[in-house]
Every structure is written in structure tokens, then in C-alpha cells.
Image (cartoon, rainbow, N blue to C red):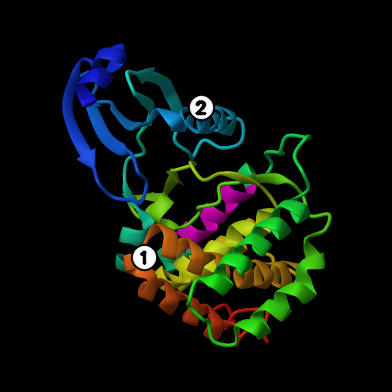
């Protein structure tokens, strides 16, 4: 497949080195390709042809991102060969923040979070297509689907009925929330650090549209376990060094509570061998919020 890709892309024919990338959960082949011309690097993905429409949409999103940020990967080419599709983007030099943050001083972790939060605010200026259904209706329907599957899955979260009541009592907060761009996988694994500083954002494949506050639930389930200084910095950077208001924390807690049930269902379907790890993350969320008696998590306070 890589040879076919090289035939289809004239700018990659003069390659110097090809490195296969195995990191991540995506079901596609990924390659880092270095060319002889100034040793320029490209990131290539090869995927099943039935994914082509979705990848084309992602390619268009990356094109649009250039109007909002200079800290993301840029699209180069998308195409097809035989029974595969491919997409080539620029490559961001550095290492992912998940790997780098623990080795850095807390002050650096915090500053990287601040810079990431500022960049997140920029990409949230991208408005959803006008024909899109309201965020409230789409999110409520997804939640009902996950609750249905959760009740049938055989796993029971401690005090789950109490958490479901908390969600039902706060669902109205989603009404009239804005429909804006969501990276929807904004966490250290998809952020690049170079020379101890924030360098950019990668992996837009799970993008969505809706309430920008929904973006922050990744902090509660993933990021706070990697770096609390970064997590606080991301929030402070997004809100331009101001404290977020009560509405933010209410929505943050609501989305995190909803995520508990979707995480169980998703994990059983996609990464069943890691279900115990995900359940530990869920227990951490419940402890952080005292089973959602607290809106603001203990790690932030």
C-alpha cells in the first residue's frame, strides 16, 4: 500500500525515509515520510475506501482551520487507489504532550496548558453549518442511546441511578447552547510539544459540532491524570486568565456525568480488554466530584 501511495503522490516519490507509526486507536495505516528536498516531513494515512467521505470532510475541516489557527496540521492531498484511500498532511515536529508533560517542571506544564487553551478558543470560532440540528436535540438523543445500552451491558457503576438523576435534572442547561466546531479529542495525546513549549494540534478525525464546553470533558477523564497543572492551565488560557463562571462548571459536570455511561458502552465495543482501566478513570471522576454533589472538581480547587 505504501508503494501505491508513493506512485500516486509525485511530491513523495523522492523520499528519503519511511517510518510506520503504530501509536493510537485508529484502524488505518500511518506513516511518517521524510523527503530528500530539505528533509521535509509529511504524515500519511491509508484507510479503507468506505471511510473516504468522512476523510474528505476532515480534509475540508483542516483547510478551514487555516483561517483560525497556525498551530494545527495542514492538509496536502487526499485521493484514492484501488480499494484504499489516502490523506497526506504536514507533520508537526516534536513529541505528544502525553509523553512530554510528566518530565517537565510544573510551571512549564501549566504554560503549555495555557497556550493550548488559547488555541482551543481560536478554533471554537468556527461556526457549524446552519442546517445542523440543535446541539440539545443531538446530544440528548445520543445520551438516551448510551443509557439504553448501558443498562443492557452487564456493568454497573456505583450510584448510577443517582448520577442519572443528576443528568436529567440538568439537561435543560444544554438548550440554546451554541453550535460551534469541536475537535472532540482535545487531550495531551493529540497535542504536540517541542523544546518544552506548545507546538500544535493534531488528529482532527473525531471532529464534531456543538457546545464548546463539551470539549473540556476530556480533562476530567484523561488529562487530569496526566498533568493537573496543564489541566488548570488549559482552562485559564481558554478563559483568558479569568475564572470560569458557574455555568461553565455546571455544563462541565453535566457532560462529564453523561460521559461516564458512554465511556462504558464505547469501551466494551472498541477496547474491551481495557475496560478495567476505563472503570478506574470513571471512579476517579466520581471521587473528583463526590458523585456530582460538587460541580467544581477537587483537583481544580
- Report helix, strand or loop for mark 2: helix
Magenta segment: does it hold 120? yes
Range shown magenta: 111-121
Label ID, residue 272: 1
Q: Position of residue 179 (x, y in %)?
A: 74, 46
Residue toward you, 151 or 101: 151
**Above or below 272: residue 202:** above
Label ID, residue 290: none
Counting labels gives: 2
Q: Residue at x 38, y 19 (%)?
A: 80
Question: Which quarter of the figure has residue 140?
Answer: bottom right
Q: Position of residue 121 (x, y in %)?
A: 63, 49
Q: Is residue 84 left or right of residue 163?
A: left
The prevailing secondary structure element of the residues shown in magenta is: helix
**Above or below 203: residue 58:** above
Q: Residue at x 37, y 75 (%)?
A: 276
Q: Mark 1 or mark 2, which is nearer the start of the sequence?
A: 2
**Above or below 98: residue 203:** above
Q: Position of residue 190 (x, y in %)?
A: 42, 50
Q: Residue at x 42, y 69 (%)?
A: 227
Location of the N terminus by quadrant is top left
Q: Is residue 242 left or right of residue 223?
A: right
Q: Residue at x 26, y 35 (%)?
A: 31
Give the mark toward the camera: 2 or 1.
1
Magenta segment: does it hold 264? no
- Report helix, strand or loop for mark 1: helix
Mark 2: give few (<14), some (14-19) or many (20+) Cα within 10 Å. some
Q: Position of residue 145 (x, y in %)?
A: 63, 60
Where does label 2 land, which residue? 56
Amino acid at each position: 500500500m505504501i508503494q501505491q501511495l508513493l506512485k500516486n503522490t509525485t511530491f513523495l516519490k523522492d523520499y528519503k525515509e519511511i517510518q510506520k507509526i503504530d501509536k493510537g486507536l485508529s484502524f488505518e495505516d500511518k506513516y511518517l515520510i521524510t523527503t530528500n528536498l530539505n528533509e521535509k516531513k509529511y504524515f500519511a494515512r491509508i484507510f479503507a475506501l468506505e471511510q473516504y467521505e468522512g476523510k474528505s470532510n476532515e480534509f475540508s475541516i483542516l483547510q478551514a482551520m487555516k483561517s483560525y489557527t497556525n498551530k494545527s496540521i495542514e492538509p496536502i492531498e487526499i485521493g484514492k487507489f484501488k480499494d484504499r484511500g489516502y490523506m497526506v498532511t504536514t507533520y508537526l515536529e516534536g513529541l505528544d504532550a502525553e509523553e512530554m508533560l510528566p518530565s517537565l517542571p510544573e510551571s512549564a506544564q501549566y504554560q503549555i496548558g495555557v497556550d493550548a487553551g488559547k488555541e482551543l478558543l481560536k478554533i471554537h470560532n468556527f461556526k457549524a453549518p446552519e442546517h445542523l440540528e440543535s446541539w440539545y436535540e443531538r446530544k440528548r438523543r445520543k445520551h438516551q442511546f448510551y443509557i439504553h445500552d448501558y443498562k443492557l451491558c452487564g456493568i454497573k457503576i456505583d450510584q448510577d441511578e443517582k448520577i442519572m438523576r443528576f443528568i436529567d435534572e440538568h439537561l435543560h442547561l444544554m438548550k440554546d447552547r451554541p453550535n460551534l466546531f469541536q475537535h472532540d479529542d482535545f487531550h495531551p495525546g493529540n497535542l504536540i510539544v517541542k523544546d518544552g513549549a506548545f507546538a500544535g494540534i493534531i488528529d482532527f478525525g473525531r471532529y464534531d459540532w456543538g457546545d464548546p464546553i463539551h470539549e473540556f470533558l476530556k480533562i476530567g477523564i484523561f488529562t487530569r491524570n496526566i498533568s493537573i497543572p496543564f489541566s488548570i492551565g488549559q482552562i485559564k488560557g481558554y478563559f483568558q486568565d479569568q475564572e470560569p463562571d458557574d455555568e461553565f462548571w455546571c455544563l462541565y459536570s453535566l457532560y462529564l456525568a453523561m460521559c461516564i455511561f458512554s465511556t462504558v458502552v464505547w469501551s466494551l465495543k472498541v477496547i474491551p480488554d481495557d475496560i478495567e482501566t476505563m472503570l478506574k478513570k470513571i471512579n476517579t471522576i466520581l471521587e473528583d466530584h463526590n458523585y456530582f454533589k460538587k460541580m467544581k472538581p477537587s483537583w481544580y480547587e
